[in-house]
Amino acid sequence: MRSIQVEQFKPSQGISFDISVYNTLDSKGPTVLRVHEDYELTVLFNCSGKRIVGNSIHNFYGEDMFLLGSNLPHSLIVDSPEKGNAVCIHFTEESFGQNFFNIPQNANIKKLLSRTSLGCHFFGSEVIEIKKKMKSIKSLSPFHQMICFLEMLHTLSNVKEYSVLSSPGYQPTTKRKESKRMSLVNDYILENFTKKITIDELADLINVSPATFCRLFKKSMNKNFSEFITEVRVGHACKLLMDSDLSIAEVCYMSGYNHLTHFNQKFKHTMRKTPKQYRNDFQLGYEY
């Protein structure tokens, strides 16, 4: 079961925020959904997999940068965790002093932080330099770590190429019982999405009626079950289209669909292009 783990971070030695460097993404025990009060800026290097943030699941490849707000559930499922590495910075609005982000010259950073309640994924040429700074920030003196980090936040606040990760209106579940239920449902879906999954079996999984399940799922995820399972299946199909030479029909069946026409319809509705167009664009080097 994918459980909820509440984390707390202490400032690194000599500075008022936390910088953590991971030379491997391998972890002992089951994958968990993590929540914490801090903001989190993360860059992943040399790895691929699935990034779970709030009520969204997205694939990532090579290098990945995202910024998360407070109490936003998140997790990573990494394909080859022993090969990947990451740098994470955890900070609060008080890390640089009370009301620091409220001063006029930090207005853009304040706007950036307000967007992170749903999580932001940054991409494109504008973030290349930020990724380089993330790689080297740990080696700087405490003063220059602070300056470097503020420069990164300032640059990010002006980046135009970014996507919001969770859907509008999503609110993290505050009740522990509901969090555990949805964590169990989320885990079951990720393990069984290639097969037929019914609302009845998910309702049985958490010992509620089908009607109650639908209400709980909608409240927690801000989308219904059919929308969520489509996102998971189409996301998996995207990964297969990029990582393999499988035919479109094979990708269809390996993503939980039994009919190619239905798969093409769902894929195009979700990705705004056909599976063939998606694969062609990826081979041409377009960013997703």
Image (cartoon, rainbow, N blue to C red):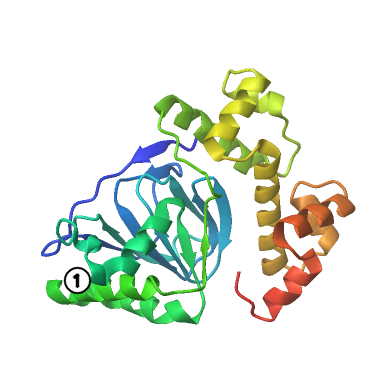
Residue 103 location, quadrant: bottom left
Q: Is residue 192 shown left or right of residue 252? A: left
What residue do we see at 49% from left, 74% from top? 160
Visible residue check, residue 26: no
Query: Looking at the image, is 127 positioned above or below residue 263?
Result: below
Residue 261 placement (x, y as % from top left):
89, 53
| Residue in the image at 34% along x and 57% along y | 40
Percent coordinates x, y for residue 197 in the rendering: 72, 34
Please tell me which residue is depicted at 52% across the width and 73% down the height of the picture.
161
Where, quadrant-wise, is the C terminus in this rendering?
Answer: bottom right
| Residue 178 higher or lower than 279, as above or below | above
* Residue 176, visible in the rendered structure: yes
The image shows residue 2, relative to residue 114, as above or below, that is above
Specify whether 54 is left or right of 282.
left
Q: Nearer the viewer, residue 271 or 21?
A: 271
Tally the marks: 1
Q: Secondary structure at mark 1?
A: helix
Q: Nearer the viewer, residue 12 or 17?
A: 17
Residue 130, image x and y in percent?
37, 77
Q: Quadrant of residue 129?
A: bottom left
Q: Residue furthest left?
A: 14
Front one among 222 and 102: 102
Amino acid bearing label 1: Met
Residue position for label 1: 146
Q: Residues within 10 Å of mark 1 (few under 14, many from 20)?
A: some
Q: Residue at x 23, y 50 (%)?
A: 9
